Amino acid sequence: MRIGELSERTGTPRRLLRYYEEQKLILPDRCANGYRSYDERLVDRVLQIRGLLDAGLPTRIIKQILPCLDKPRRIHFSDATPEMIATLENERDRMSQRIECLTRNRDAISDYLDAVLGNKTAG
Amino acid sequence: MRIGELSERTGTPRRLLRYYEEQKLILPDRCANGYRSYDERLVDRVLQIRGLLDAGLPTRIIKQILPCLDKPRRIHFSDATPEMIATLENERDRMSQRIECLTRNRDAISDYLDAVLGNKTAG
DNA sequence: TGCAACCCTCACATGGATGTGAAAGTGAGC
DNA sequence: GCTCACTTTCACATCCATGTGAGGGTTGCA
């Protein structure tokens, strides 16, 4: 598919699809006329990128963790340098911290909403 | 405590403590000489702010959800306008999405690491 | 043939969180 | 009184994700 369709199906501005490519997060093919040609499964990948960006990860890190998610079965040992392993362990831990923080605060918001809505008539 | 101590205890540059104040996330007292004076519990609050920023929330939103976390017991009904309720529900849902995304990807990283480290000698 | 709707690259702009440093006031200790 | 380590405000700089638009090529259709 071309950039317009991918843009619509992922809700992502064309500008950003080109930006993600510039940052080497995705690597579309090119048609004879120079147009970008996106594979079907890039839809999911783009959504994943957007989710991670929204969760606070920079493109530099996303680029490093994406290969781990490509094929759960086929491990890329070529990428598995000691530095890469260390990076991944570090990012995994940071993500766990983020999850904890978000969970804690989301639950607090939930409690607050329950209290406010539940007591509304009584308040 | 003054800004230097809070900075050290939270690992936050002074510049940012002033920035958070400018964004109305914290409201320190002032000593007679004009120095900022921070209450003890602002340590936790600053750490919470940093965690939420790191998880992708902008200061504008953090400012809105912080009052819900102040006193789990004492609900501020004055803040509970319909718009505020809607905002909180919306942010709660967005945080849940972030948690899902982070969890999914963190688990994938974990699986990858398990596979790479576990199979290292066999690969 | 010409228009409309795509696509391309390039480049400058914006907003939010953060870095850096200048110029100046305060306070404790020598 | 001087010095040093703190503090203040102010302002300009940087990084990154994103917006915007110019200038131009490609394709399909009336």
Image (tube, coloured by chain):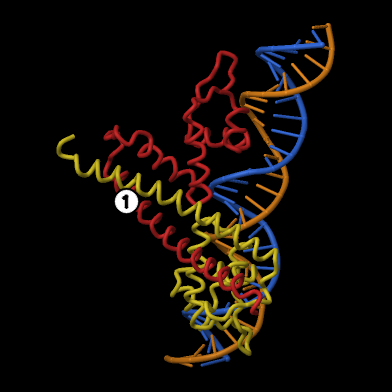
Chain colours: A red, B yellow, C orange, D blue
Query: What subunit carries mark 1?
Result: A
Percent x, y of residue A93: 35, 56
Residue B67 visible in image: no
Residue at horizontal 61 percent and vertical 87 percent from the top: B31
Residue at horizontal 43 percent and vertical 40 percent from the top: A63
Residue at horizontal 66 percent and vertical 71 percent from the top: B80
Percent x, y of residue A81: 28, 40
B69 vs B9, nearest the viewer: B69
Q: Is residue A42 above or below residue B19?
A: above
* Structural crowding at the residue carrying mark 1, measured as other residues with C-alpha within 10 Å and reported as few (<14), some (14–19) or many (≥20): some
User: Disc 1 marks which residue?
Assistant: A89
Percent x, y of residue B63: 61, 67
Q: Secondary structure at mark 1?
A: helix
Residue at horizontal 70 percent and vertical 63 percent from the top: B83
Left/right of residue C11 with respect to residue A65 in the rendered view: right
Residue sitting farthest toward the left: B121
Q: Amino acid at mark 1?
A: Glu
D19 vs B76, nearest the viewer: B76
> Disc count in the image?
1
Image quarter of residue A96: bottom left
Residue B95 visible in image: yes
